[in-house]
Amino acid sequence: MARKKQDNPEETRKEPDEDLNEIVDSVIGSNDKEKTVQEPTNDESIEELLSASAKMVVETCMDIRRGENVLIVCDPTTGEIGKVLHEATINKSERVLLIVMPKAKHHGEEPPAPVANLMRQQQVVLAPTKYSLTHTRAIRQALRDGARVATMPGITNEMFTHGGMAADFNKIKKRISNLGPHFRRRRIVNVKSKQGTDITFEVNWREWKLDDNGICNRPRMLTNLPAGKAFIMPREGTMNGILIIDGSWDSTLLDEKIELQIENGMVVDVKGGQIAANIRQEFGEVAKKLRSKDRESVWTIAEFGFGMNDQARMGGNVLEDEKRLGTCYFSIGDNTALGGSSAVGIHIPGVLTKPSVWLDDSQILQDGEFILEID
């Protein structure tokens, strides 16, 4: 699985600490004449695309205002994106700080203490990093202290300028809002697909999350970018059936299906060749670190959601895959962020490409196409 590759220490050693200095130099010395002469013409268009996306993040997504304290946190893999975000932000506020921290080893690793302390002093935090900071204590504390935060785990220059990031987030906000009334008072969710999915579970309809729309303009708001999904925690212990994941799993574009057998809200069997074996191994290793009574909880179906971004692509990066319009996704593992009891420290999603979905007796999706008027 891709997660294994990301955690490979050999990969970490291939990125020397000197990368930090190079990135800092690129920010401080952005007007270096020799560097400008060496840049080929086609890089100019890439720079223009990066600048346009950064301007959209600053002005549309975050609505940064003059005088606000803004912290941009990047790492050696995302330095160019950090740089263009910095350049776009200083046009709005003179109180902007860009920090290049060492690349983390895995999703959810806490940033260095000085970075965490700086986060608490901001009105806006932008975090384009290799590994996710979304579920760290540092981000939670910054939110409690009034910051609004956009995290961009795994973001690349190509992702930042194309696909889901090229969407009209105001339209996505409207689309998700229009979907909201169809959730009202509907308790039973049924998902089917031609691949063989047939799964049923209960939800508390008041708990649908409809704010992942890319507009993060008020204190204590948190979003991923690219954005665009509506999601909820399945009621614990209620899900039963067969779930076929055919799009992507975590950061892997699938070439063979994953079959999950689910009983009473837990995965009880995984089939699908080598990737299924990898899944069993990965979740098994996490389970071994837990108390015996908590080990089964790693297999909790933690989250269900709809992709709502019409520009998002299926490319093997979960940040964008689960936002693709017409797909739905299920996550396995930790559900505490949504109010659940499975505190297991792993949370991995899988995407279905062409689902059919019913809420009670009302159909929402037919083979990956919304049959409601949502635009």
Image (cartoon, rainbow, N blue to C red):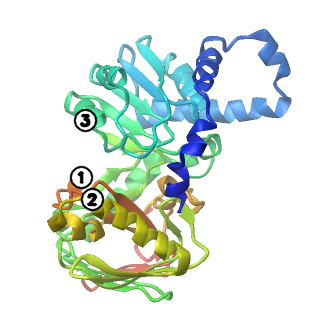
Q: Tell me how far mark 3 sits from mark 2, CA to CA.
A: 22 Å
Residue 75 percent coordinates (x, y): 52, 30
Tell me: 258 left or right of 13.
Answer: left
User: CB atoms at circles 3 and 2 under 8 Å apart?
Assistant: no
Question: Which of labels 1 and 3 is toward the front?
Answer: 1
Q: What residue is pinned by disc 1?
A: 337
Along the viewing direction, whichever of 372 and 347 lies nearer the viewer = 347
Q: Is residue 356 visible?
A: yes
Tag on residue 334?
2
Secondary structure beneath label 2: loop
User: CB atoms at circles 2 and 1 under 8 Å apart?
Assistant: yes
- Name which residue type carries label 2: Asp
User: Residue placed at 51% from the left, 17% from the top?
Assistant: 91
Q: Tell me how far mark 1 sits from mark 3, CA to CA.
A: 15 Å
Image: 161 above or below 111 = below
Residue 96 percent coordinates (x, y): 44, 16
Question: Which of labels 2 and 1 is toward the front?
Answer: 2
Quarter of the rendering occupied by the C terminus: bottom left
Tag on residue 220?
3
Tell me: 259 left or right of 85.
Answer: left
Image: 350 above or below 237 = above
User: Residue placed at 49% from the left, 29% from the top?
Assistant: 102
Q: How many C-alpha atoms fall within 10 Å of the one at disc 1: few (<14), some, or many (≥20)?
A: few
Residue 220 percent coordinates (x, y): 25, 35
